Amino acid sequence: MPKIVLDGKEIEFSQGQTIIEAAKAAGIIIPHFCWHPKLSVSGNCRVCLVEIEKSPKLAIACSTIASDGMIVSSMSDKAVAARNAVMEFLLINHPLDCPICDEAGECKLQDYAYTHSTGESRFTEEKVHKDKRVPIGPRVMFDAERCISCSRCIRFCDEIAKDPELTFVQRGDRVTIVTYPGSELDNPYSMNVVDICPVGALTNRDFRFKARVWELSSTESICIGCARGCNTEIWVRNNEVLRLTPRLNEEVNSYWMCDHGRIDTFKFVNDDSRVDGPFLRHKDKLIRAGWDEALSKAVSTLKQYTKEEIAFIASPYVTCEDNYLFARFAKSVIGSKNIDFMRHIDPTFGDDILRREDKTPNSKGAELVGAIPAKGGLSFDGIMTGIKSGRIKALYIIEDDIVSAKPELEDILSKLDLLIVHSTNFNKTTELADYVFPSSTYTAKNGVFVNFQGRAQRIRPAASTIEQDRALDGMNLSRLDKFGTPFDSWANSKQRDARATWRIIQALMQIYGIKPKYSIAEDIFIDIAKNIEAFKGLNYEILGDLGVKLKTAKPELV
Amino acid sequence: MSLRRRKKDLTFWEKIYIPEIVKGLALTLKTMFKPKYTVEYPEVKFIPPASYRGRPVLVMEENGKERCVACGLCSRVCPPLAIFVQAAETPDEKERYPVKFEINMIRCIFCGFCEDVCPEEAIVMSKDYELAFSSREEAIYGKDKLLTPIKQVQDRINFLRQYK
Ligand code: SF4
Ligand code: SF4
Ligand code: SF4
Ligand code: SF4
């Protein structure tokens, strides 16, 4: 393999790589603003200037192709002086309004001002003033003064979102970003420009001023917006989910996620409509009950029906663990064959970038772990017809608001004698229920989702329920979590009395006389790995941060 | 090994000790006729100089609004995590302001770091040292208790401009 010498270290590269790419592959980051591994090279910020031996002038590492034997220095006096000069130049017209800028704390310009700048400006003249607080799109705010004209946002729209909306206008110190006449920055991926903008020129309108980033904890998770299962980080303060950001996974979503996933998939977690504790129907009203009471009453009512009269609706929104235990409960404990889940297909949602028509994160996983009808059992539609005809009298639904998804089901479900529902929030389905068990959201539990590619990926708890303790349960902590006490208003947020669906099912099974086997979600996953071919040999550690593609992805009929 | 001798052994006059007592009493007598430094608190209040670090307060501009832009730096620097700031958007030029600003006076150690770090000269140490609470909740000072007209803290601001 050809080699270059970078700062005295020999690194290998493959033909055609630029210096910056070769360095990155070897784990060395050459400072840069405008270069991005997934975008075309524009070479306009000049921060990546390096010295190359025998070359008369400094060269930009992002567009200089590495060639064998090149001796490159990013630390030589000349390179350092050039970098300082570029930083000074970029800061000439920068407003330095970090105190009101949401990017502060994760800003490349701020970081480089510490590491690659002299800290002094010789510029005493009045700075150029431009428009601030420009709503450049429905979800993105633009501040022209902060922009360093790196063109990352323009290239993103052109090359990744495939929807050219942005362009430079004017020249010199008056250059700024605008949308083309009559258009807005409103493509379904528009908020990625917030992540890639190296400064605070483009910010997230949804997260605007909600918190400082250093107050938040971040936890690796998976988006539940569609079957792609983009890898994400959940950002939490005081047990409230405040934003989601994409996490690099080249096999799934690269650096990106869509706007729907980013802003529409976590609000329900913080919402007042959350189910807090179990509820029982008492004279047309749902009344809060204790766990033991609700569980034992639910079992004794369930026992009044024959196994042919009971049907089960699993959920493509919950983890494999939840669905697995639910299916086991339905098939082995109750002995019913009627279990299926609703498919949420939206043909208008899919595209050929990331978004998939299947708007749930785990339909593949639900099928694999057996949340599908047993031989001779009823499918979803069959169950509905069964209810209509009176053959099915009791229905057990976990975490899927099927009535909101299909309003015509309301009439059908009201024919039921018994409806048990697990739900994170009160909704149209819980309105009809006789028992509502509070399930914790995907932000508060461990588990595995299988995306449309058949890739098993982990979610982790980021926000806690009443039964979880951030520190003891090993959740990621922010500084506020570490030092807060229940007496601090910023540390005594609302925690709901909710449990992961598998825990509730396990408690029910215990009443049926089955000894509880699982103490954590991974115990179930190990069971899944033992019993289901596709998951053979896996555990949470092997899944790691980026997930594993399953060997076979065909559901077995059990 | 000889005992270590004192640096200065007592002289004869010191040893007989009566002249020393007289000297001491003379000092007492002299001081009795000098002006007093103590005050009859709480009837008489001590008014500290501008360099004094009483409880931190938020500066309220003449227009009745706070200077603070809710940047959260004071909250970040505060060693005992006494400060909590929640920002929100305002149509004013400064774009953001604190909808909620709380200092937990049980946590505060009067170090003045918040004042030091504030980029807006928006939080300063006042002369107020009279703090008493009967419950934890009472000790959490919100914007209502923190906002102080700029006139009342002007001498502290002048002091900071001169010495910070
Ligand atoms: S808005 Fe941000 S990403 Fe776009 S050119 Fe300016 S600095 Fe670069
Ligand atoms: S593409 Fe799908 S998984 Fe990815 S962010 Fe959007 S909704 Fe979420
Ligand atoms: S004086 Fe010190 S302890 Fe008190 S609020 Fe300010 S930074 Fe915190
Ligand atoms: S440092 Fe100053 S401007 Fe920032 S939040 Fe504190 S008081 Fe407000």
Image (cartoon, rainbow, N blue to C red):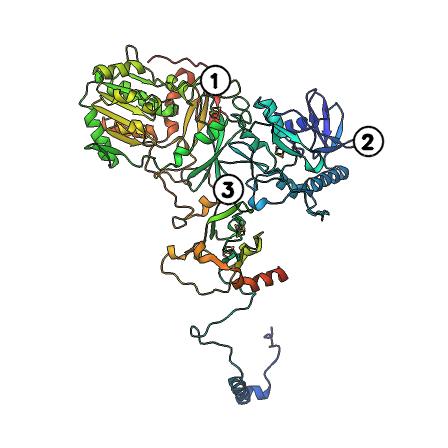
Q: Position of residue A403 (x, y in %)?
A: 31, 23
- Asked if residue A337 shows in the view, the reply is no
Q: Could you tell me which secondary element the residue under label 1 belongs to?
A: loop
- The Cα atoms of the two marked residues, 1 and 3, are separated by 37 Å
Q: Nearer the viewer, residue A13 or A240?
A: A240
Q: Residue drawn 69% across and 43% down?
A: A92
Which numbered disc flags the more N-terminal residue, 3 or 2?
Answer: 2
- Asked if residue B15 shows in the view, the reply is yes
| Residues packed near mark 3 inside 10 Å, few (<14), some (14 to 19) or many (20 plus) | many
Amino acid bearing label 1: Gln
Residue most extreme to the top: A376
- The Cα atoms of the two marked residues, 2 and 1, are separated by 50 Å
Residue assigned mark 2: A56
Residue assigned mark 3: A209
Q: Quadrant of residue A310?
A: top left
Q: Position of residue A505 (x, y in %)?
A: 29, 27
Amino acid bearing label 3: Phe
Residue most extreme to the front: A182
